[in-house]
Image: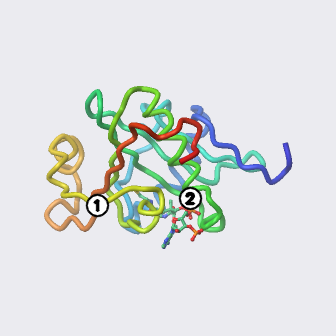
Amino acid sequence: MSSTTITIRTARLSDAVAIEEISSRYATQGYMLKRAPENIIENIRNFFVAERNGSVIGSCAISFFTLHLAEIRTLAVVDSFKRQGVGSMLVRKAEEVLYEEGVKTAFVLTLSPDFFNSLGYHQVEKEMFPQKIWRDCTNCPKLMACDEIAMIKELEGRTVGGLQ
Ligand SMILES: CC(C)(COP(=O)(O)OP(=O)(O)OC[C@H]1O[C@@H](n2cnc3c(N)ncnc32)[C@H](O)[C@@H]1OP(=O)(O)O)[C@@H](O)C(=O)NCCC(=O)NCCS
C-alpha cells in the first residue's frame, strides 16, 4: 500500500473521537446535525471512515428507516482533503452496503446538493420522509427554518463495487 493510499472501511470504536472531531466542526457551521460522542459510539458499526496514513480524513454514516429506505448522513471530509474524491468514495461505500442489505432508496438531507447531484441524487420534497421528521427533525434547532435539501437515489440496478 502506498503512503498516500486512501482506504474506506467500516469504522472501529477507536475511530469515534476522530469522527466526532471532524463532524462537530461542520455541525457548528450548520452543515449537519451535531451527534454526541455517545451517539457515535452507540452507532459506530453504521459509520465508515476514510483513512490515510493512519489518520481519519473523512467519515459518513448510514441509518436504516424501513426495509427499503435508508439515509446517508454525517458525511464530512477534512478541509485539506476536499475535492479529491474522498466524499464520493465514502458515499459509494455506504450505497454498496445499503444495496447489499436490500435497500432500494438512499436519501440525504444536505446543504451540498451539487456534490450529491454529481453522484446521481436528485431533489425531492422533504415531506417524502415522515419517518425522518419524526426521528430527528423534531429535535433539530432548525426545525421551523430548515434549509436542508432532500435528495434521493434509487440504488436498484447499480453495480456493486462502486462502478456506475
Ligand atoms: C460535501 C463533501 C462531503 C464533499 O466531499 P469531497 O471529498 O470534497 O467531494 P468529492 O471530491 O468526492 O467531490 C465530487 C464532486 O462533487 C462536486 N462537489 C464537491 N464539492 C463541491 C462544492 N463545494 N461545490 C460544488 N460541487 C462540489 C464536484 O462535482 C466534485 O467533482 P470535481 O471535484 O471533479 O469537480 C465535503 O465538501 C464536506 O465535508 N462538506 C461539509 C459537510 C457537508 O456538507 N456534508 C454533507 C452532509 S449530508
**Left or right of 148 on screen, residue 125:** left
Circle 1 packing at 10 Å, graded few (<14), some (14-19), many (20+), is some
The quadrant of the rendering that contains the N terminus is top right
Residue at screen point 42% across, 56% down: 120
Circle 2 packing at 10 Å, graded few (<14), some (14-19), many (20+), is many
User: Which numbered mark, 2 or 1, is in the foreground of this view?
Assistant: 1
Tag 1: amino acid = Gln
Q: Does the residue labelled 2 lie within 8 Å of ligand 1?
A: yes
Judge by depth and name the residue closer to the eye, 3 or 128.
Answer: 128
- If you read the primary sequence from the N terminus, does the residue marked by circle 2 or circle 1 appear first? 2
Task: Give the x, y percent position of residue 86.
Answer: 61, 56
Q: In this view, does 81 lie above or below 134?
A: below
Write down the residue under mark 2.
77
Task: Give the x, y percent position of residue 149.
Answer: 28, 63
Task: Give the x, y percent position of residue 9.
Answer: 62, 37
Q: Is residue 12 above or below residue 158?
A: above
Q: Is mark 2 on a helix, strand or loop?
A: strand
Residue at screen point 33% across, 59% down: 122
**Left or right of 147 on screen, residue 73:** right
Marks 2 and 1, how far apart at CA: 22 Å
Judge by depth and name the residue closer to the eye, 25 or 59.
Answer: 59
The answer to whether mark 2 and mark 1 are in CB contact below 8 A is: no
Write down the residue under mark 1.
123
